[in-house]
Structure formats: structure tokens, C-alpha cells
Image: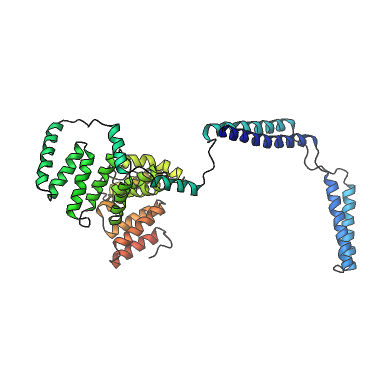
Amino acid sequence: MAEWWEIGGFFLIASIVAAYMLRALFRAGQVSAADGTERAMKVYRDQLAEVERDLARGTLGAEEAERIKLEISRRILDLDRDIGARRVGGPAPAAMRWVAIGTVVVAVLGGGAIYLNFGAPGYPDMPLVQRHADAAEARANRPRQAELEAQFAAAFPEPEGFQGREELEGMVAQLRAALQDRPLDVTGHVLLAQNEARLGNYRAAIEAQIRVIELRGETDADVADYAYLLDLMVIATGGFVSPEAEAIIEQILRRDSQNLIALYYSGRMYAQTGRPDMTFRIWRRLHDLSAGDDPWMPEIRAALPELAHISGEPRYTLPPRPAPAGAEMPAPSLEQIEAAEDMSAEEQAEMIEGMVGGLMARLANDGGSAAEWAQLIRALGVLGRDDQAFDILQEARTVFAARAEDLALINAAAAEAGLQGTAP
């Protein structure tokens, strides 16, 4: 019911606006514009009266007042002699009036059609603060890990079949029995977690991986141990990031702010709880840190342009796909340089983008010399990707903070790239 009231209110307001506009158009066809001569006469009369007032107040001398009045009188006489005084404006041609009327009608009807098809009758306005508050509430109240696992298991009750499954099941059963007698066997629990996951026994795999972390100690366990646990937890829920998985994400990022698995699932969590703007920021960074063959690259490359649009970043351009992991980016050969001279501007830009993407991926994964970091900063500056260049600059300053010569090279590259105001 409320929806129909709001639709009726929309058309009522639109009709009132249209009526006023049409009334103005019809009156414009009937009323002539004011006479230009009469308006000019009024101005001159007002000027004469002002001169008399200034003379009475003593702010204007008698001679000066007389001179001004003579000049105004001369202009009045000239205006009187101008028998061809023009009218300013005039009625619009009939055809133009009908075009304007048609435009008003189309605007009202078209606006109504767009509202009914793409609007949300019955829903109140939702400002940004409210949307963020609703997203925070959705994040706080989302289902827990156990509930999500139960839902996923109910949706897919049959385990995935594959060749050698029966043999693997027998081996895993033996491993479970052996670990009953060797509960402190870390390697055994590592193997158990991996093979339980292969069988689709995700809850058992999660418990085995938790045992691995307990045996190694929370502080001594590798970030990779936590990342594997996170992966298992999200797979077990069918891709949803639970509050428990979020806690693991936070623990990983506190120890390694560039952990790719944690960044990927962090972006997915925000997308699931109504914060696509946060997903865009996180996945944009993840894209820059990832190799071209990382498993999440197809998903995030497909999502980033739309996420940018939703997040108010219409100028965002998806960068070229980085090189695969381990791919080297040697300096361009003499033949490549000569070939580039014959390329079009677009072809040259594409070649440079590819080289920059490869260098960025290699530095993110394997590190590199200060000269290579400086080369990347300059290249990003040439390409006009100042935001990325600044992020790389900040990271390079952290990497080479203790080496004065290398830091000087990095800062010199920043200056060449035109990164103003970025001195440490």
C-alpha cells in the first residue's frame, strides 16, 4: 500500500511542476515583452530625481548638478526622437512552443517510467552513513562458522568423487588411528589436515590444522599455517567469511600486512557485508601485489571495474595483468628499443604497461635492488599512475630505510617522477 502512495505522490508532484511550466509557456505566447523605450525613460527619470536629492543634501555642487541634468535631458530628447524604439524579447514562435510542451510531457512520463523500472518505491532514502551502519550491523550479525558449515553440508551432502578416493579414505583412517597414539606428531597432523580436505571432510581438516598451530605454538606457527586454516574455513562454508574466519584474517594481517590469501578473503568479507568500497580498496592493492597466475586474479580483475564504479572511482582503469610468478623482466634489449621507435603511441604504451606489470609482480614476490624499485617508481610516474607510484615509494622507503645510499636513489626517482611533497 505504501508503495502505491509513493508512486502517486511522485506523479502528483511531477504533474504540478509540469502544469506550472506549461502555464508559463502559454503565457509567453500571449504577453509581449516590455517596451524598451519605457524602461529607459524610467531609468533617466530616476537619475534626475537622484541628482535633485544629492543637490539638496549638499553632496553635489550646483554647477555639477546642472551639468548632469543637462546631459540626462539630452539623452531623453534623443530617446524621444527615436521613433523606432525596439521591444525587447517577444513571443516565441508557435513551433518552438510546441517543442517545449512536448519536451515537458516526455520528461514527466519518461521520468516516471525510469522511476518504476529502476527506482525503489516503498524504500526510504539511504544516506551513506546509514548504509555504512547497516553494513556494520550485517557484519556483526552474520552467521557463525558452525552454522555456515552446516548449511553448506546440507546443500552438498554427497562428497566429491575422484579416482583413488577409496584408497585415500583407507590411508586417512589409518593416519587418524596412528595419531591417537602420537598426539604430538606435528607432521602427522599436517598430513591429516591436507588429506581430510581432499576427501571433503572440511570440519576434520580444520580441527587437524588447528592442532598443528597448537603444537607449533601460536607465536611460532608460520603465517602460512594460519593462511591454510583460513582457506579451509572459507571453503567449508561455501565461500562465506564467518566471524571466526575474520578473526584469523586479522591475526594474519597483523603479522604480514601483504599476505595475499588474507587480503583476498578480507575483500570478499566486505563484499558480503555491504561494503564494496572497502573491497575495491583491498582488491586493488591485492592486484598490485599478486602474480598474474594467482588463482584469485580472474575474479578480482572481473570485479574491479564495477567495484570502482560503485565506490565513486569512475576514472579507475584496470591495469594490465601482471606477469606469472617467477617471470623475469629483463631490461629492454637494443632490438626492442629500436622496434619501439616504429610503434604507435598505443603500442608503446601497451609494451611499457606489460614491462611495468612484470617488474611490479617480481618486486612484490621476490624483492629486488634499489635501482629496480627506482625504475618502477619512475615508470609509474611516466604512465601517470601517481597513486600506485606513491604506494610503491612508501614501500621502498620501508625496505631501504636502513641503507642511506639506496634510500637516496629511491628519493631521487620520486623527484624525477614528480611525486611532490613526498620527501621523508
Q: Which quarter of the rendering shows the N terminus? A: top right
Q: Quadrant of residue 115?
A: top right
- The answer to whether 39 is drawn above or below residue 151 in the figure is below
Q: Position of residue 109 (x, y in %)?
A: 61, 31
Q: Position of residue 384 (x, y in %)?
A: 42, 52
Q: Position of residue 196 (x, y in %)?
A: 18, 39
| 92 relative to 211 in the view: left or right | right
The residue shown at (39%, 54%) is 381
The residue shown at (38%, 40%) is 303
Q: Quadrant of residue 179?
A: top left
The residue shown at (45%, 46%) is 134
Colour scheme shown: rainbow
Pick whichever, 194 or 62, lies toward us.
194
| 137 relative to 397 in the view: left or right | right
| Label tally | 0
| 403 relative to 130 in the view: left or right | left
Question: Visible in this render: residue 337?
Answer: no
Q: Position of residue 277 (x, y in %)?
A: 42, 47
Question: Visible in this render: residue 1?
Answer: yes
Q: Which quarter of the rendering shows the C terminus? A: bottom left
| 78 relative to 382 in the view: left or right | right
- The answer to whether 187 is drawn above or below residue 120 in the figure is below
